[in-house]
Image (cartoon, rainbow, N blue to C red):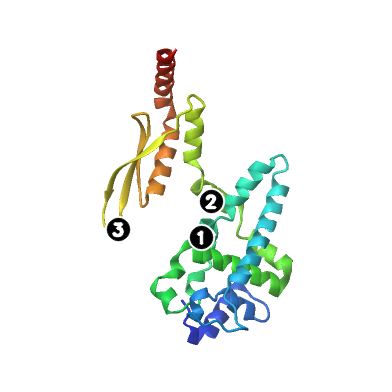
């Protein structure tokens, strides 16, 4: 992570890795985290938040247009969902890590102490700011090239697998039979707070559909839902039977 005293050296190194052409002032601004000023904000020096705003708009346009052209038979809902996955916080943070932007972010002591440069939100913002800086400095053709070299079909497949809405799919499968939704029950949480392993059961009215573990409750729930979908032929007949018996009882 760049200290404020040697940021010129760091930015020059990043510019070389990015094959940045011309002035690097905007690149430096893109790497300037809001904590860099430590509460004192000069009038003529900005953090990367303005560039982040611009980069977000450019990303939405370029990726949206590319999806529109690549999938001529898909409707708006599919295209919106695909774009959301590709430009979500986790996706952009992954691209930022591939560029090692965490090593170039300029922060104040508070940001360094809190390890802001390792957080998905910070890295996602930095990537958007970089896109905004690239557009202003070198134009749309170079920006499009930069983005499309990274948002490849292989990257899209990886992101789709990671951010697939397995919980939503599981709920859809179950509610095709009954109005009730699946529930997620915490079975255990083992380990210290910063390195805990959570085990979650995906359930339906007392019936355990699958059990999975993860480094967060959200991850464990998602994995449990995914495993339940893979095993749906085992439990779907049981849910149908439960629903039919309940309907007969209430008739």
- Percent position (x, y) of residue 35? 49, 76
Q: How many labels does the image show?
A: 3
Outermost residue toward the bottom in this view = 5
Kindly identify which numbered label has been placed on residue 159.
2
- Lower sequence index among marks 1 and 3: 1
Evaluate whether residue 104 shows in this view: no
- Percent position (x, y) of residue 97? 50, 65
- Percent position (x, y) of residue 52? 60, 67
Which image quarter holds the C terminus? top left
> Image point 42% across, 76% down: which residue?
110
**Labels 1 and 2 touching (C-beta < 8 A):** yes
In this rendering, the label closer to the viewer, 3 or 2:
3
Residue 32 drawn above or below residue 61: below
- Lower sequence index among marks 1 and 2: 1
Q: Residues within 10 Å of mark 2 (few under 14, many from 20)?
A: many
Residue 141 drawn above or below residue 109: above
> Image point 42% across, 13% down: which residue?
248
Kindly identify which numbered label has been placed on residue 94.
1
Q: Mark 3 points at which residue?
A: 193
**Labels 1 and 3 touching (C-beta < 8 A):** no
In this rendering, the label closer to the viewer, 1 or 3:
3
Callout 1: SS: helix
Image side of residue 161 versus residue 113, left or right: right
When asked about the image quadrant of residue 125, the answer is bottom right
């Amino acid at each position: 992570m760049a200290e404020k005293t040697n940021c010129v050296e760091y930015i020059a190194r990043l510019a070389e890795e990015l094959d940045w052409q011309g002035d690097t002032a905007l690149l430096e601004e893109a790497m300037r985290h809001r904590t860099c000023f430590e509460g004192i904000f000069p009038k003529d020096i900005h953090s990367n938040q303005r560039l982040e705003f611009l980069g977000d708009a450019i990303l939405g346009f370029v990726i949206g247009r590319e999806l529109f052209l690549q999938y001529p038979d898909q409707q708006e809902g599919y295209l919106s969902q695909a774009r959301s996955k590709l430009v979500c916080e986790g996706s952009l943070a992954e691209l930022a890590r591939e560029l090692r932007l965490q090593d170039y972010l300029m922060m104040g002591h508070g940001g360094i102490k809190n390890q802001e440069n390792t957080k998905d939100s910070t890295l996602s913002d930095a990537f958007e700011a970089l896109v905004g800086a690239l557009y202003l400095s070198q134009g749309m053709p170079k920006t499009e090239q930069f983005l499309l070299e990274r948002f490849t079909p292989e990257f899209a497949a990886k992101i789709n697998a990671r951010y697939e809405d397995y919980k939503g799919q599981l709920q859809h499968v179950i509610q095709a039979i009954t109005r009730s939704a699946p529930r997620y029950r915490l079975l255990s949480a083992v380990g210290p707070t910063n390195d805990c392993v959570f085990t979650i059961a995906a359930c339906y009215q007392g019936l355990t559909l699958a059990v999975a573990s993860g480094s967060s409750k959200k991850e464990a729930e998602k994995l449990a839902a995914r495993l339940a979908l893979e095993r749906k032929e085992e439990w779907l007949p049981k849910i149908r039977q439960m629903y039919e018996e309940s309907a007969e009882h209430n008739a």
